[in-house]
Image (cartoon, rainbow, N blue to C red):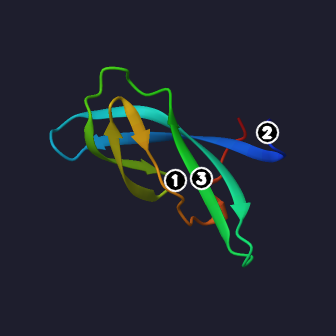
Amino acid sequence: MHEIAGREIFRTPAVLRSLESFRVAGCMVETCSGYFSSGKTYTRCRIVYESSDLPDGPYRVEFSGHSIRINKVRGQWQCELVFLTPRMQSSKA
């Protein structure tokens, strides 16, 4: 199990699909859940173990029945907080 600031990190196999070309690549998505002061649950996600030669641009990452649009800008993935169901947390890191 991997933890950051007392939160469990989960890794899930994922697929990255370019929205500008036919490029498809495998990766892993690390997720970590937390709570807003209102009590609503959020999940942060981060792309890891992706192919280093993927160009900047818009992508869709698909994992555990979820699909999230993300962008790669200057070599960095730009992910936002996303509300997800707990079922997507399939394996601990």
Residue bearing the label numbered 2: 3
In the figure, 30 relative to 43: above or below? above
State left or right for residue 53 relative to residue 33. left
| The N terminus, quarter of image | top right
How far across and down, in percent of the image, does residue 52 sit? 37, 20
Ranked by sequence position, the earlier of labels 1 and 3 is 3
The residue under label 3 is which amino acid type?
Answer: Arg
**Disc 2/disc 1 C-alpha distance (Å):** 21 Å
Q: Nearer the viewer, mark 2 or mark 1?
A: 2
Q: Which element is circle 2 on?
A: strand
Which residue is located at x 40 percent, y 57 percent? 67
Residue bearing the label numbered 1: 64
Judge by depth and name the residue closer to the eye, 15 or 8.
8
Which residue is located at x 74 percent, y 73 percent? 37
The residue under label 2 is which amino acid type?
Answer: Glu
Residue bearing the label numbered 3: 44
Q: Tell me, yes or no, whether the two marked residues, 1 and 3, touch with CB atoms within 8 Å.
A: no
Judge by depth and name the residue closer to the eye, 29 or 77.
77
**Can you name the residue that lies furthest to the bottom here?**
38
Ranked by sequence position, the earlier of labels 2 and 3 is 2
Q: Which element is circle 3 on?
A: strand
